[in-house]
Image: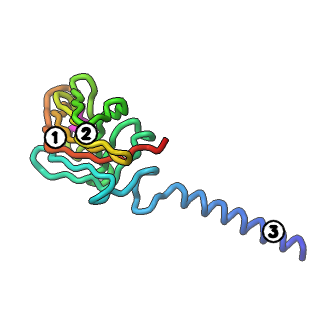
Amino acid sequence: MKKLFALATTAILVFTSAEKSIAQNHTPNNLPPGAFSTTAVGWAMTAKINGKDCKAHSMMPPDIAEQIVGFYNGDKYIGLPYIKKYFVAGKKISLDNYNADLTTADDVQVWNGRKGEIVITKVNDNWVEGKFYFTGYSYDNKHTIEVTNGFFRIALAKK
């Protein structure tokens, strides 16, 4: 009887730990691991891609992604340079020196964002906001895509 009890206990412990690791690998709402859902007053990213409205459904914390990343349309994303020292209201960041990234559901799929700008519009103890635009280029430089009217809001990491 003791052996049966020990075997049952071991089976329960193995199943419980396996169930926990599976749950840890799947985030709620199928967000990428570590991502936050966007909200009207919290994390946010919007833009127009070739004139079509685009709104991020989730964002990665920049300290993890090393970029300001907003996911839209499933797993597609806009990625902007993340340079904390430039988080000063009014600061302009040229994308001639720092590239942006864009992924799309088309033949090109991955775009290198150049010839654009990020402007930090607001900084307080909790948040950084900015505007951005850029031209995305295919890797063979045969195609371009325009990202305009961009906006982002990210939380500042607590010290």
Relative horizontal placement of residue 127, taking residue 133 as reference (left or right): right
**Labels 3 and 1 touching (C-beta < 8 A):** no
Residue 108's spot in the image, x, y percent? 21, 37
State whether the magenta stretch is mostly helix, strand or loop. strand
Residue type at mark 2: give it: Leu
Query: Image height check: is 85 above or below 10?
Result: above
Secondary structure under tag 2 reads strand
**What secondary structure is marked by label 1?**
strand
Which sits earlier in the primary sequence, circle 3 or circle 1? 3
Residue depicted at x 35% and y 49%: 59
Task: Decide: few, some or many residues near mark 3? Use Cα within 10 Å; few <14, some 14-19, many ≥20.
Answer: few
Q: Which residues are magenta?
A: 108-112
Residue 132 at x, y percent in the picture: 20, 39
Q: Residue at x 33, y 52 (%)?
A: 43
Q: Do residues under tags 2 and 1 come within 8 Å of each other at their CB atoms?
A: yes
Q: Which residue is drawn at the image coordinates 40% and 36% (left, top)?
A: 66
Tell me: 67 left or right of 95: right
Q: Quote the CA–CA distance across marks 3 and 1.
A: 60 Å
- In the rendered structure, which amino acid carries the disc numbered 3? Leu
Between marks 2 and 1, how big is the CA–CA gap? 9 Å
Q: Which mark is residue 147?
A: 1
Q: Is residue 46 above or below residue 143?
A: below
Measured as percent of width and height from the top left, residue 1 is found at 89, 77
Q: Nearer the viewer, mark 2 or mark 1?
A: 1
Residue 9 placement, left or right of 75 = right
Graded by Cα atoms within 10 Å as few (under 14), some (14 to 19) or many (20 or more), the crowding at tag 1 reads many
Mark carried by residue 7 = 3
